[in-house]
Amino acid sequence: MKRVMTYGTFDTLHFGHIRLLQRARALGDYLIVGLSGDEFNAQKNKKAFHSWEERKFFLEALRYVDLVIREDTWEQKVADVKLYHIDTFTMGSDWEGKFDFLSDFCEVIYLPRTPSISSTQIRELIGS
Ligand code: C2G
């Protein structure tokens, strides 16, 4: 079984996120998502509209996602890749090159980011 991993905030889940998760899942047979906790989001200068539990609920409702774990630090990825026996790590292309160090442990693939949609735009639209 080929195991794939990705990470993110996935706030106000939208088309771009789901396209990313669909393509990530298609890289293997099992997709694990490291979902950013609120404290880690603060380190990314982000404040999610939805709580971690709500964002986890949304992801678990998707056919593409098999397991959701917490993302609390930048440094946890190597340990996660080993712990979950990850074959392929993937992120959207806005992260191109940032996680190449993981290629010592697994395949690293960056998938084209979906243009013209973001959680920031959606939050602005809903006024929060
Ligand atoms: N994404 C995308 N297209 C968009 C928006 C997002 O493909 N229009 C992708 C991003 O490239 C990322 C994933 O969807 O791979 C999740 O995006 P965010 O929730 O914005 O995650 P981010 O804040 O980039 O967190 O350790 C990694 C970080 O936690 C990534």
Image: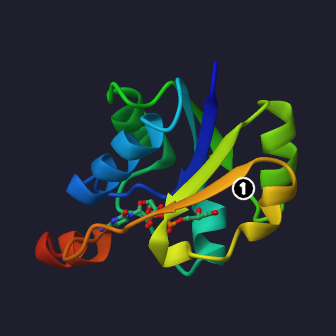
The N terminus appears in which quarter of the rendering? top right
Tell me if residue 24 can be seen. yes
Secondary structure of the residue carrying tag 1 is loop
**Quadrant observed for ligand 1 in the rendered image:** bottom left
| Viewer-nearest residue: 9 or 42 | 9
Q: Quadrant of residue 99?
A: bottom right
Question: Disc 1 residue type?
Answer: Asp
State the image coordinates of residue 33 (x, y, percent, origin top left): 56, 41
The outermost residue toward the top is 1
Rendered view: 49 above or below 62: below
Residue drawn 55% across and 74% down? 95
The C terminus appears in which quarter of the rendering? bottom left
Q: Quadrant of residue 2?
A: top right
State the image coordinates of residue 19 (x, y, percent, origin top left): 29, 50
8 displayed left or right of 51 = right
Q: Residues within 10 Å of mark 1 (few under 14, many from 20)?
A: some
| Snapshot colouring | rainbow
State the image coordinates of residue 18 (x, y, percent, origin top left): 30, 47
Rendered view: 54 above or below 108: above
Residue drawn 70% across and 50% down? 107
Tell me if residue 128 can be seen. no
Residue drawn 19% across and 79% down? 124
Residue drawn 45% across and 35% down? 25
73 displayed left or right of 32 = right
Rendered view: 57 above or below 123: above
* Residue wearing tag 1: 72
The outermost residue toward the left is 125
State the image coordinates of residue 67 (x, y, percent, origin top left): 56, 27
